[in-house]
Image (cartoon, grey):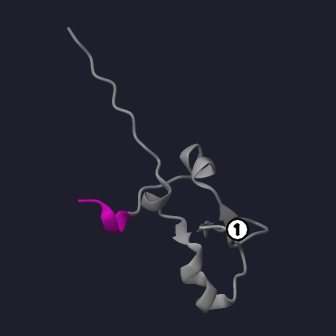
Amino acid sequence: MPTTAIATLQTIWDCRWSRPARALFAVDGCKTDALWICVRPTATVVRRPVTEEECEHCPHWELNASIED
């Protein structure tokens, strides 16, 4: 019997914790050259620059509930 493997893509724009960095400039004066910011709260950092490659392999990645259908 054939089996099918389903790979879930962890894209940065689908993650619950990622935000476009430019949208945050007006909010809190966040200065960075990054395109994306991770807003997942940790013990020491609230917002940090993140790359698409980091997000693809992040163990904390969660699908943004507002885009589920």
Give the residue at x 34% y 31%.
Answer: 6
Query: Is residue 1 shown above or below 46?
Result: above
Q: Which region shows up in magenta?
A: 65-69
Query: Is residue 26 shown above or below 34?
Result: below
Q: Tell which of 1 and 12 is nearer to you.
A: 12
> Which residue carries the number 1 mark?
48
User: x%, y% of residue 68?
Assistant: 29, 60
Residue type, mark 1 in image: Arg
User: x%, y% of residue 44?
Assistant: 79, 68
In the rendered image, which quarter contains the C terminus? bottom left
Judged left or right of residue 7, residue 24 is right
Q: Tell which of 30 and 47 is nearer to you.
A: 30
Judged left or right of residue 21, residue 32 is right
Query: Is residue 25 shown above or below 61?
Result: below
Give the residue at x 46% y 52%.
Answer: 11
Label 1 element class: strand
Q: From this viewpoint, which residue is outermost toward the right?
A: 44
Crowding near the residue tagged with mark 1, few <14, some 14–19, many ≥20 C-alpha atoms within 10 Å: some
Secondary structure predominantly adopted by residues drawn in magenta: helix
Give the residue at x 54% y 65%.
Answer: 18
Q: Tell which of 35 and 41 is nearer to you.
A: 35
